[in-house]
């Protein structure tokens, strides 16, 4: 079978019709993406090595969190056995096709115990070093996910100190998948072409189909003024939310809808952004179809090795 035929056979099992999927494939570097995910596991390790953005700064992140070879998932030296087990469970909730993409394109997952301040010491100077539940840094293609957060007090010298860390296990899986959404926005965006055939700005959230869909949803939200207290982080300021209506809002909504497409829809944000969700889900299904049509079956280990999965 040709690659296109294999691809159409694979999408037949998904929500997309073959026509929709083919349309979407035309707006991505479909051949490049297929080749990358279809390479042997050994070649995928080489692809990863070339894609990793070395993080070597002495200030940010902490020395133990600097780039280490192929390492894919870094875990805190302060984790206890329970936390290691929980990390494994959370890692397993990230869909395999998402892992395949982020692995190959040099994504790194950094899981700390004591807030972001543990892995990013410069954040000790800000309250958010202790209170932010997750962070994706595009310039180093790293996702930071702290297992514990803290209430803070400001020190006289302007730094902050925690006054008691606490765990929020119920939100962890959703937040890890939300941050992964930011990583996908960045990485899959690099394979995206605008409908005109020219390179997009580099993020999925800059694509015309997503921008049109979220603009329609926002028009409806402004008209109906839903109660947004619980979801204010994903809502525009003018109706009582927390985000300016620009790139920031587009990206936060995308990340949360990606988590929902990944099966972690705890916030049910799609009820306010049904059109944007439809587009995000189409990207999710597209990536899945590319992987299922020709992706190599590799086990992406935390140490960064890609080990062939033996078929029975
Ligand atoms: Zn976010």
Image (tube, helix red, strand yellow):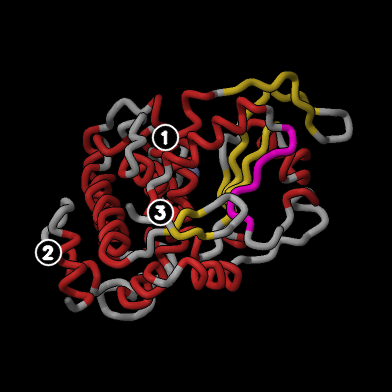
Q: Is residue 20 magenta?
A: no
How far apart marks 2 and 1 lie (CA) works out to 38 Å
Of the image marks 3 and 1, the number of the one nearer the N terminus: 3
Determine which of the numbered discs, if any, sits on residue 241 in the image. 1
Crowding around mark 3 (Cα neighbors within 10 Å: few <14, some 14 to 19, many 20+) is many
x, y percent for residue 113: 68, 33
**CA gap, disc 3 and disc 2:** 21 Å
Q: Is residue 256 visible?
A: yes
Q: Is residue 184 above or below residue 32?
A: above
**Image vertical order of residue 195 relative to residue 115, above or below:** below
Q: Position of residue 219 (x, y in %)?
A: 24, 46
Residue denoted by label 3: 98
Q: Is residue 215 visible?
A: no
- Determine the main secondary structure of the stretch shown in magenta: loop
Q: Nearer the viewer, residue 138 or 25?
A: 25
The residue lying at 72 percent from left, 19 percent from top is 164
Residues shaded magenta: 71-78
Q: Which mark is residue 289?
A: none
Q: According to the image, label 2 marks what residue?
A: 18
């Amino acid at each position: 079978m040709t690659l296109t035929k294999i691809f159409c056979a694979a999408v037949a099992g998904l929500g997309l019709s073959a026509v929709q999927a083919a349309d979407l494939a035309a707006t991505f570097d479909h051949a490049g993406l297929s080749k990358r995910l279809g390479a042997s596991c050994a070649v995928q390790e080489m692809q990863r090595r070339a894609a990793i953005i070395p993080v070597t700064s002495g200030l940010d992140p902490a020395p133990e969190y600097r780039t280490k070879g192929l390492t894919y998932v870094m875990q805190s030296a302060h984790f206890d056995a329970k936390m290691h087990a929980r990390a494994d469970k959370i890692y397993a909730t990230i869909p395999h096709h998402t892992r395949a993409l982020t692995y190959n394109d040099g994504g790194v997952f950094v899981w700390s115990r004591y807030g972001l301040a543990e892995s990013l010491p410069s954040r000790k100077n800000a309250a958010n070093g202790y209170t932010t539940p997750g962070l994706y840094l595009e310039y180093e293609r790293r996702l930071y996910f702290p297992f514990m957060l803290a209430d803070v007090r400001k020190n006289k010298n302007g730094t902050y100190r925690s006054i008691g860390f606490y765990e929020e296990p119920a939100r962890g899986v959703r937040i890890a998948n939300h941050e992964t959404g930011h990583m996908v926005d960045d990485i899959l965006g690099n394979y995206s072409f605008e409908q005109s055939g020219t390179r997009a700005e580099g993020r999925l959230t800059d694509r015309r189909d997503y921008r049109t869909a979220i603009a329609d949803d926002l028009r409806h939200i402004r008209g109906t003024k839903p109660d947004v207290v619980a979801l204010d982080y994903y809502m525009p300021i003018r109706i009582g939310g927390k985000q300016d209506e620009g790139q920031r809002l587009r990206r936060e909504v995308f990340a949360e809808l990606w988590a929902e497409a990944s099966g972690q829809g705890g916030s049910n944000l799609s009820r306010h952004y049904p059109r944007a969700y439809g587009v995000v889900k189409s990207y999710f299904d597209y990536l899945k179809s590319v992987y299922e049509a020709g992706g190599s079956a590799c086990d992406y280990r935390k140490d960064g090795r890609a080990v062939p999965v033996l078929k029975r």
